[in-house]
């Protein structure tokens, strides 16, 4: 991801134009009460206002104008000379300091030369002012050096902002790469745990089929059935995987996503669902795993429990989220050893448990024959300090 190097100069350039315009107008307004003839000050204020508005308009339409320093500095120099011709006083000094700062934005520390030229001209103007009114000599003589300081300050500020923008872009790009890698890893895990295993079994059955056709026709018939069933299962798992990947919409509120999953399941099964969720905004990986756990728990309730009602509740705690899915179905006896679930082909609970572990949490299933089933997933949340790190 590349950084547009015109971003920082354009931003600081807008600030310089606004600052110079405001300072010039303020100085002209203050001098109106002291000047015998206010017309030069009013004209200087008009020039400052018009040029500030024009400069901001140009930067808004074409920020890349900061990459053309010669015409920018030439036009700005004419502005300073125009203000000098109208009012060789405080308004001029403000315009000269602003021009030096704009040069620092456009050409960096090379603007010190331009700032020094404005300072030299400023001392000549200060000498002329003091010749007519020697009062406040120290105050007047301090103005020209502000040109050099403004050039250096604007150059440093522009460079610092450019580095900050580049660092921010690198941090965002790194986060995007990490998110993309996480998505690829998650998709690979899903494919490995579902479709890949099924296709592997289909492949073994297909390899044994040619020999069985010649020697064991009955076995070949069974293998052909296995291949057919495996292909159908793989297609079903792929469809379930795609549905799962689409289940979460990170841009939507998480409660709305869970509620929509429950509503779709209720429409497809006719089983009422009571839904309650606390406000929360978990990380994308946690959202995804909780959505898949909810889908699997609802699928099990529809297939195996004979439930007439289901409750879904999401509780948000300071350090973790708890998702609980309960039904009033027939229930079952939970084995003491989870390996018995695999032996009995109860892969849904094992899959939910693996999902909870992949998100750093735990899954607890409680059920008794005739007493319904409750699935509870507790997923930890990162602390605010950890979550804010790039």
Image: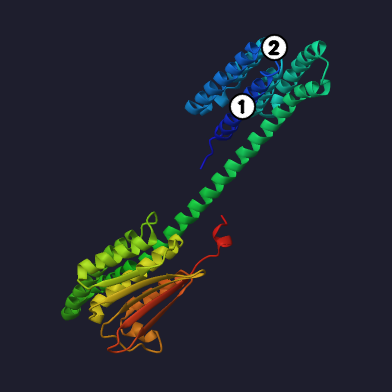
Q: Quadrant of the C terminus?
A: bottom right
The image shows residue 190, relative to residue 27, as above or below, that is below
The spot of residue 258 in percent (x, y) is 34, 65
Residue 134 disc label: none
Q: Earlier in the sequence, mark 2 or mark 1?
A: 1
Which residue sits at x=32%, y=78%? 326
Height in image: 374 above or below 268?
below
Residue, x 26% and y 85% (percent of image)? 330
Residue underneath mark 2: 36
Q: Residue at x 39, y 63 (%)?
A: 288
The answer to whether any part of residue 240 appears in the image is yes
Disc nearest the viewer among 2 and 1: 2
Asked if residue 204 lies left or right of residue 4, the reply is left
Crowding near pointer 2: few (<14 within 10 Å), some, many (20+)?
A: few
Q: In the rendering, which numbered label is found on residue 22? A: 1
Whole-number angstrom distance, CA of label 2 to CA of label 1: 23 Å
Dot 2 lies on which element?
loop
Residue 204 in sight in this render: no
Pointer 1 local density, CA inside 10 Å: few below 14, some 14–19, many at least 20:
some
In this rendering, would 236 be left or right of 387? left
Percent from the top left, x then y, of residue 32?
66, 18
- In which image quadrant can residue 154 be found? top right
Find numbered disc 1 in the image and state the secondary structure of the residue it sits on.
helix
């Amino acid at each position: 991801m590349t950084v547009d190097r015109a971003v920082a100069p354009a931003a600081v350039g807008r600030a310089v134009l606004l600052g110079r315009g405001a300072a010039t107008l303020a100085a002209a307004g203050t001098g109106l009460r002291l000047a015998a003839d206010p017309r030069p000050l009013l004209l200087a204020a008009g020039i400052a206002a018009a040029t500030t508005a024009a400069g901001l308009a140009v930067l808004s339409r074409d920020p890349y104008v900061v990459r053309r320093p010669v015409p920018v500095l030439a036009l700005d120099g004419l502005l300073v000379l125009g203000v000098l011709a109208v009012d060789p006083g405080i308004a001029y000094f403000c315009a000269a300091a602003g021009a030096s700062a704009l040069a620092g934005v456009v050409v960096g520390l090379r603007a010190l030369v331009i700032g020094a030229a404005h300072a030299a001209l400023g001392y000549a103007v200060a000498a002329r002012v003091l010749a007519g009114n020697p009062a406040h000599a120290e105050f007047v003589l301090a103005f020209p050096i502000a040109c050099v300081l403004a050039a250096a300050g604007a150059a440093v500020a522009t460079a610092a902002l450019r580095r900050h923008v580049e660092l921010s872009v690198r941090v965002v790009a790194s986060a995007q790469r990490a998110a993309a890698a996480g998505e690829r890893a998650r998709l690979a895990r899903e494919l490995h745990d579902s479709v890949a295993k099924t296709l592997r079994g289909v492949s073994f059955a297909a390899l044994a089929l040619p020999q069985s056709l010649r020697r064991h026709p009955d076995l070949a018939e069974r293998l052909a059935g296995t291949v057919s069933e495996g292909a159908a299962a793989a297609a079903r798992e792929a469809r379930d995987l795609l549905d799962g990947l689409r289940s979460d919409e990170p841009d939507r509120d998480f409660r709305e996503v869970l509620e929509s999953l429950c509503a779709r399941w209720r429409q497809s099964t006719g089983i009422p669902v009571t839904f309650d969720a606390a406000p929360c905004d978990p990380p994308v990986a946690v959202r995804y795993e909780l959505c898949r756990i909810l889908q699997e728990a609802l699928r099990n309730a529809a297939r195996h429990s004979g439930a007439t009602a289901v409750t879904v509740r999401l509780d948000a705690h300071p350090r973790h989220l708890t998702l609980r899915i309960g039904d009033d179905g027939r229930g079952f006896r939970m084995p003491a050893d989870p390996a018995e679930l695999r032996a009995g082909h109860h892969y849904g609970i094992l899959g939910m448990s693996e999902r909870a572990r992949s998100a750093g949490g735990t899954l607890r299933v409680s059920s008794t024959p005739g007493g319904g089933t409750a699935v509870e997933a507790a997923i930890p949340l990162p602390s605010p300090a950890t979550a804010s790190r790039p």
